[in-house]
Image: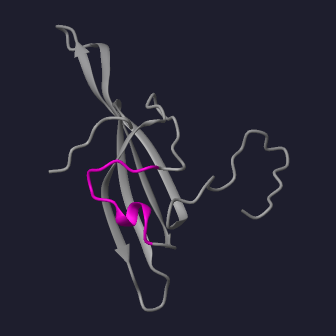
């Protein structure tokens, strides 16, 4: 990473912490969501809310710099994300599933990859996966 000086910006974060295996990252996105159930009374006034089924999703895009990591992984299997973050109540260290991968190649640019992943607080990275 190039040297950057942050002035009067304590606790700000510059750029992307680490590249992924075989990917020179341009953009890293992490998002946490959940399901909500609103509870109403007999006058249809909302009196409560239930939040559950939390999930964290990631999207990574960048230039291809190798052939391992996500480029060799199967959809639905666990992969490692170097820029994993605790967000919205979903901690780091959960099993991160590869959801989809897309490679774009053009005559006038370097090859690029975009892929999406998801993880759930109830599935750890040590969970057994059986591929049949």
> Vertical placement of 72 versus 106: above or below?
above
Image point 69% across, 53% down: which residue?
14
> Vertical placement of 39 versus 113: above or below?
above
Outermost residue toward the bottom?
107
In x, y percent, where is residue 53? 29, 29
Relative side of 122 to 21, left or right: left
27 or 51, which is in the foreground? Answer: 27
Q: Tell me the quadrant of the picture where the N terminus can be found.
A: bottom right
In x, y percent, where is residue 13? 69, 47
32 or 8, which is in the foreground? Answer: 32
Relative side of 5 to 71, left or right: right
29 or 22, which is in the foreground? Answer: 22
Give the magenta-colored segment's residue range.
67-80
Q: Quadrant of residue 95?
A: top left
Q: How is the image coloured?
A: one colour
Magenta stretch holds residue 102: no
> Vertical placement of 70 versus 123: above or below?
below
Image point 51% across, 55% down: which residue?
28
Magenta stretch holds residue 70: yes
In x, y percent, where is residue 131? 19, 50
Image point 84% across, 44% down: which residue?
8
Q: Quadrant of residue 130?
A: top left
> Vertical placement of 27 versus 121: above or below?
below
Image point 39% across, 61% down: which residue?
70
* Prevailing SS of the magenta stretch: loop
Could you tell me how many numbered marks the image carries? 0
Relative side of 132 to 110, left or right: left
In x, y percent, where is residue 115? 38, 60
Outermost residue toward the left?
132
């Amino acid at each position: 990473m190039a040297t950057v000086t942050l002035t009067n910006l304590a606790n700000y974060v510059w750029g992307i912490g680490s590249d992924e295996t075989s990917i020179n990252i341009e953009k890293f996105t992490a998002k946490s969501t959940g399901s909500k159930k609103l509870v109403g009374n007999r006058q249809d006034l909302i009196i409560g809310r239930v939040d559950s089924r939390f999930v964290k999703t990631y999207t990574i895009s960048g230039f291809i710099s190798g052939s391992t990591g996500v480029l060799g992984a199967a959809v639905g299997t666990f992969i490692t994300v170097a820029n994993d973050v605790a967000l919205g109540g979903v901690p780091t260290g959960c099993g991160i599933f590869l959801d989809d991968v897309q490679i774009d190649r053009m005559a006038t640019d370097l090859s690029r990859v975009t892929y999406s992943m998801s993880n759930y607080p109830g599935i750890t990275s040590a969970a057994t996966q059986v591929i049949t």
